[in-house]
Structures are given as C-alpha cells and as structure tokens.
Amino acid sequence: MSRITSHPIVRRTLGSKVTFRFQNEQIVSHEGEMIASALFAAGYRTFGHHPKDGSPQGIFCANGQCSQCMVIADGRPVKACMTPVREGMHVVPLDGLPVLPTVDEALPVQEIETISVPVLILGGGPAGLSAAIELGGRGVHVLLVDDKDRLGGKLVLQTHRFFGSIDAVYAGTRGIDIGTRLEEEVRGLPSVDVWLKSTALSVFSDRRVGILRNDSYVLVEPEILLVATGAREKSLVFPGNTLPGVYGAGAFQTLVNRDLVRAADRLFIVGGGNVGLIAGYHALQAGIDVVGLVEALPECGGYKVHRDKLARVGVPIYTSHTVLSANGGNAVESVTIAQVDAGFAPIPGTEKSFACDTVLVAVGLDPVDEFLRAGTAYGLRTYAAGDAEEIAEASAAIFSGKIKGLEIARALGTTNDPIPDAWRTTATVLKSKPGEVLDRSAIDMHLAGSRESDDGASRSVVPVLHCTQEIPCNPCTSVCPLGLIQIDADDIRHLPRYVAADGKECIGCAKCVAICPGLAITLVDTREDPDNPLVTIPLEFGDEQVAAGDTVTVLETAGEPLANVRVVDVRSIPANDRTTLVRVRADADIAQRVAGLRVQQDWGGSPLPDAVEPIRDQDIVCRCERVTAGEIRSLIRQGVHDINEIKTRTRAGMGACGGKTCQSLILRLFREEGVPIDQVTENVHRPLFVEVPFAALAGATETVIEREEER
C-alpha cells in the first residue's frame, strides 16, 4: 500500500505531518487522517485478531458501523476508521478482548444537557443537506448532525460526474464538487446549526434523541425528526469473506478518493451494479489494476455506460458468474469464481481463480432506517429522505431531501406552498431503474446535418451519441449552445438525438463531449479531410497518459478494438473540469463507431493455472462473533425459528456491529432451508445504534481512561 501522489480528478493537499506508533514502529501520517487510512498507507492490512479463533481482522465498512477495524489507541479500544491520528499516539492491535481498567472510586457526573429544536436532521449527505437548505432558506431552526468530520456523506467519495438533470441536481458535475456546493449553501444559512463528529445513538420512548457529540452526551428534543442516514452495504457469505482485503465499495472509495491511499495493487470486484462499476473505474483512475468483475445476472444491473467504460479499458467482466471464495492465510491472495446456471447455482468444472490482493464486495445496499423505525414507533413526527427512505442514486437523494424539506416546513406551518407536481415527477424520474437498451442506428447514428463541398465530399462536424440505454440524464442537451442535442418529450430518460435544423449546425465546441457523465459522446469532424476525419474522445485518466504523435487503439462502445490510430492533439483546459479531450485521425468507415481509446493494456486478469477449492462448511455469517453458516443451519434444522434463540446459543448478532451485517444473511439461511419468513421471529433490535462508553451516558466530566492515565 502507498499514498496516491497524482490523481486525474482529486486535487487535495494532505494536512501537516503527524507521527504516531503502531506497536513499535513510527508511522508518519497527516493531520485529520483516520488511523485505518494511515495504517493502510503504511502497508498494514491486519489490525488485530479475533478472540474466538484468532482470525485476522482488518477494515470492512470504513463507516463506523462494524468492529472489524478495532484497535487500542492510547489504552482505549476505538474504531480505526473513525478515530483521527494524534501526534504521539500509541496504537496496538486488538488481539483478544480489551482489558477494562479498574475503577476504585466513582467518577464525577453531571446532569445531561437537553436541548429543544424544531427540526433535527440525522445525516449530512445529499438528502440531509438538501433538506436543510430548503428549511434554512425559510428561516426554520435546524440542527444537522453527522458522525463524520465533514459534510457531504458519500458525495465526498464520488469523483465521477452525476447523471440526472442539470437544473434539478447538478447533473454533469462531479460528486465531490456537488458536496462542496451543498455544504457552502448550508453554512450560509444562519438558522442551520451543524454538529460534526456527532453520532446519533438512539431515539427513546420519551421522543428524545441521544447524541454523542465528540465525547459529550446530549439529549435533543425535536418537534420533527428527519432521518437522512443513507445506506449500508450488504454483505455476502462465501469462504474467506472476512479476510483482510475483503471489504465494501464504500470503504474502498473512502481510502482511495477521500484519503488518497492506494488501497490495493490488484482488485477483483463482486457485483455489477452502479456501485461496483463506479468503484472499479475509480480504482483504475488511482492506478490500481482491476483484475475482473463478476456478476451473477446475465447482464450487469448498473448503467450500461458505466459497464462500457470499464470494458473499454480492458477490464474482464464475467456475467452469469459468482464468487466461490476469497483465498489466503492472513490476507487475500486470490479469488475463485464459477459460472452459474439459471438458478444461480455454480456449475461444476467452470471454476477459475485469479491472483489479487483485494476483493471488493458491491452486492447492494440496505437503508439505515433504525432511527426512522424507532421515531415512528414512539410517536415522534418522523420523516425519511434519501436512501433511508428508498435506495436510489445520489441525484435522487438530493431531490428527495428537497421535497422532504418543504413537507416539513409545511408541517411546521412555516409555509403553505404546495409540493409542485413537477417536483414529484422529477423525483420519480431520478429514482427510476435503467431502461431497455435500444438500437441507436434507428435514432441518429449517422453524420446528420452534413453538407457537400465543391468536390462532392461530405464535410461537417457532428456529435456521435453512444448511449443506448434509457436512464435519467440530460447534461448534453443543456450545454449545447445551439440546442442541437434534444430529448423527445419532457422526460430525460429518453435517449438524446442530434438534430441539425433551421440552418444551425454543430460548431465543434465539444462541450457535450466534456460534460457527458457516461463518457458516451464523441465528435466527428470531416471538414478538413472527409476520408480521415478527426474524432474527439473524452478521457479521465489525466493528460499525461497520451501525447500528440502517439499511436493508440480506438475501441467501440463495448470495448471491441477497431484500429490503431495516431493522436493529433490532447486538450486539457479548466473549462472541461478535469476531462481531457483527445483528438485522433480515423478512417471514415470507423469514425462514428469510435467510442473510446485504450490507454492501458489488459490488467493481468488471466486465470491462475488451477482453481483454488473453496471450503463451504466454514462460511462466516456473523463477522463480529465468527459464527458460521453451518452452526446456524444446524439450529434451523432443529426447529429453531427465533433469531433471538440463535443469538443466545451462537452469539450471532451479539457483536459490536449490533447485527447490522448478519441479520439479512440469517434470514437468507431461513429461506434456503425452506422456512417462510413470516414464521421467523426477528431479533430484538439493539437500544443503541453504536457502542458508547458508559461514562459518556452518565455525563462523566472525565473518562476512566483519563483517570487511569493520571495514575
């Protein structure tokens, strides 16, 4: 592992240097960096060992919701992904259970502070920020709480341009920049208070919300609670799924895009939805080899333009395949996959293994809705926005927050403005799933609007639109200065068309090429040489990848090679927002089919000579307590249908994550065993969302650790 010193999209200066110790090694980190990121950058992937079986433990969620990365920092057990380094800090692995300090006398306590607010928003991501803007703009007093050290939620990890509508949700702008815009708007509203590094712990029956603000415990009494806590990634059961090096896309993007840590050398992705496809592209931009991607469905479930971007840079995509195992001793060394039949069962004899050091699991999201359920159960006026309400794209979360903000303002009597029908329509459009893939040849895959010169040759410059799937997206129609790119009807899910009309023709400004989130537009210019036109291609790997005079391989939309061609020039200007425009000369018969260029060759994704055999009997379901699928299946087959009893007898769900990752997996085991879910008694949910020191709940004025250090 190492630092990323050059990135084509992220422009961030690391903080001042901070030195701390891990065991007995001096490690140089940077101010504000989390322990986990600093350890990764220093080459450490194992942070400790589980007390039950000694299995190596490392990062998994990087979001504070599990306990995989627990370490001892200055004598105190902390989550490495949520704890910033401090000068002189001493960090040691958590091997076994932490030793609790002895207490000879009671700590001084004080009354817990209670404050009242009209609106409490949990979550400072796209939904929470948008709601705060809508409310704060109307003068409503809002308290916005987030457990991170900056606002933006997952936006701070998104280096790609957003789909959707330019007017509604900043489509065509990179997620990291959208987060900055929303934060600036919120910070400019005097009626909005922001608490960072503050974790909501629970909604209680007296309609108060317990919040750990830094190390102080506060009770908040809101008139209305808005839950905008986003989503957590689903887990997946397979042998080796808890090895250091197996983790979610969010953790990977946190390390790479937020903290500029080169978190892997060779990455394999499980899951072909937008999350997995986008994370793969982010890995390539960070200089990480993507060995392959596996998807159980016959086609990737994410946007086709995301899939095509990966295919065009040579990433092998294995559809109708599943992961069998992650293999290695103390960390991932390889991954084994196999083809599946129509029932998603692995087909014997199709196993293939690939050398890699990281397996990225991106198999869907679950809403973080604990506070929504609790607030509703206790009669607190509770709303939800973004993924906490419904899993969708971040652009949809922005508009969801906007609508809920206005709904809450109406509920408080601050305004009588109705929710515009157009808002609800836009929200529905932004939440829509990818549509069918269409044949562009019937739309506009031709040099429309060309004109003939005196020698009879066709001479023009036109955009060629390579998007073939109906998704909510309109940046190209919004930036064309002459309005020549249009979408039929009033629905941005329809495919755009180039229409040369009323004597207007494309002027070759290439704004549509630069802004397209899917990198799915090229520009074909036959004005100078109709037989060998210039083709303008977008590139997001930095202008140092290619130079004028280079010979490059140009590719069709889905990645098939077309020809080797010469680069004429490379344009990288601020107006294109870190998208480089590469112009090549190509034969006229292939010019319209050119959709991209291969800047790197195959990623070394060839299978190993022999497949690594999986060990199915040891699949881990409960990561925290190391409970296997076999242990739980045995109880189910004995007639145990109460997850609470399973928890009592195996400790499944009793760990520090509070059952967040294993609950859905246990339910899946019941389904596999033929037990109807309505016959299953679900477990009693934890009263607190995350672990918290008792001293904080008691309002202690000093911690036990501080008392011990004084001694």
Image: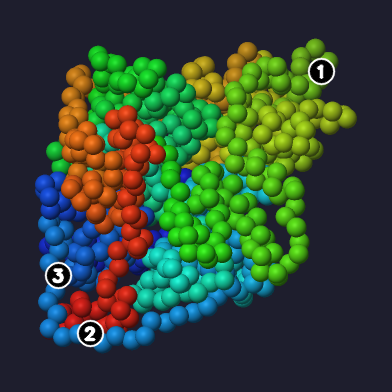
Give the alpha-carbon distance from disc 3 to disc 1, as whole Å. Answer: 86 Å
| Nearer to me, 90 or 368 | 368
Residue 416 lies, in percent from the top left, at 76, 64
Q: Amino acid at mark 3?
A: Leu
Label 3 environment density (alpha carbons within 10 Å; few <14, some 14–19, many ≥20): few
Label for residue 179? none
Mark 3 touching mark 2, by CB under 8 A? no
| Nearer to me, 588 or 80 | 80
Label 2 environment density (alpha carbons within 10 Å; few <14, some 14–19, many ≥20): some
- Residue at image position (58%, 47%) is 395
Locate the C terminus and report the quarter of the image it occupies: bottom left
Q: Disc 1 or 2, which lies upstream in sequence?
A: 2
Q: Disc 3 or 2, which lies upstream in sequence?
A: 3
Give the alpha-carbon distance from disc 1 to disc 2, as whole Å. Answer: 90 Å
Q: Mark 1 against mark 2, which lies toward the viewer?
A: 2
Q: Amino acid at mark 1?
A: Ser
Q: Is residue 164 left or right of residue 39?
A: right
Determine if residue 603 is in view: no
- Residue at image position (20%, 78%) is 704
Look at the numbered disc 2 and give the secondary structure of its residue.
loop
Q: Quadrant of residue 320?
A: top left
Q: Quadrant of residue 448?
A: top right
Q: Disc 3 or 1, which lies upstream in sequence?
A: 3
Mark 3 highlights which residue? 100
Q: Amino acid at mark 2?
A: Leu
- Residue at image position (45%, 80%) is 114
Q: Is residue 699 left or right of residue 473?
A: left
Residue 146 lies, in percent from the top left, at 45, 64
Look at the numbered disc 1 and give the secondary structure of its residue.
loop
Residue 488 lies, in percent from the top left, at 76, 30
Mark 1 highlights which residue? 453
Mark 2 highlights which residue? 107
